[in-house]
Amino acid sequence: MLNIQAVPALIDNYIWLIHSVDSNEIIIVDPGDATPVIKVITEQHLSPVAILNTHYHYDHVDGIAELVDRYQLPVYGPPNSFVPRLSTSLSATDKLSVHPKFPDFEVLEIPGHTATHIAYRVHDMVFCGDTLFASGCGRLLGGTAEQLFNSLQQICSLPTETKIYCGHEYTQSNLKFALKVEPNNIAIKQRIEDSKKLRAANLPTLPTTIAEELTTNPFLRCDQAEVIQAAQRFTGTKLTNPLAVFTALRAWKDRP
Ligand code: ZN
Ligand code: FE
């Protein structure tokens, strides 16, 4: 098994470090800031071997150049030119061999938050950037609602025990919205209590699992009667399919 370490960065980002089992080698996922990563590497005597990037937003790439200059790392990411120092752009069919100390990664194409966005899957874990969040999902900043809807469905078709490592600590604010959509959902109420305790202890609420998301994430529950009704109250129109419900929820949550 690989060990995963969360490095909190910027305001509410997580940079994920994937540790190999029996060595000090690590892979760095979405370093939006180099400073906290260098601190951990130095303190724990780690040896970084690669950077995996999910999408080009500054809070996922701004640490890349400094880390590459310091440690000479290959940078993997989606096929667009905005990721600094990108050495290999990836598409969904790739079996990604990063380093002999690590198993191969599977690359998923999950556009929607941005027009090109990828996720990395290894064992029972997925690093999904800003596509799926605990009880929420990314905003539409370049892709379409249909793309994001399909990407979320793709992630949720994985085994339900799959652990999801998201790019931000957004769980508590997402749960507020989730409860607005489904005021009678006991799983959401329980998760509000659980995440309150974790945050009070300064612990991440992540990773989440697909099983947890299927019961507490309104964006994955667009076929549920209470969710459909809430979305229809927001739009004032009849919504006849899950994508229309999803699109309404996204617009509702984006409303200031
Ligand atoms: Zn983003
Ligand atoms: Fe982000």
Image (spheres, helix red, strand yellow):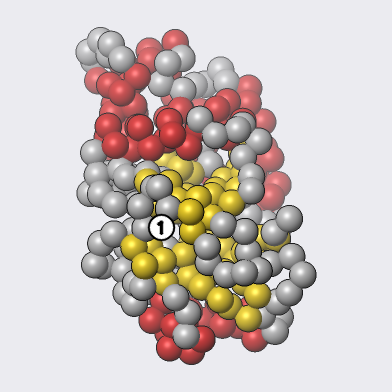
Label 1 residue near ligand 1, CB within 8 Å:
no
Q: Residue 180 placed where, x, y %? A: 45, 27
Please name whichever residue, 247 or 153, is drawn nearer the observer in this view of the structure. 153
x 61%, y 31%: residue: 160
Q: Residue 53 placed where, x, y %? A: 42, 63
Please name whichever residue, 176 or 106, is drawn nearer the observer in this view of the structure. 106
Q: Which residue is mark 1?
A: 54
**Quarter of the figure that contains the N terminus:** bottom right
Q: Is residue 212 visible?
A: no
Looking at the picture, does residue 135 appear above or below residue 226? below
SS at mark 1 in the image: loop
**Quarter of the figure that contains the C terminus:** top left
Which image quadrant is residue 27 in? Answer: bottom right
x 48%, y 89%: residue: 70
Looking at the picture, does residue 131 appear above or below residue 58? above
x 57%, y 70%: residue: 99
Which image quadrant is residue 59 in? Answer: bottom left
Q: Is residue 23 visible?
A: yes
Q: Residue 203 placed where, x, y %? A: 67, 57
Characterize the local packing of mark 1: few (<14), some (14-19) or many (20 or more) Cα atoms within 10 angstroms: many
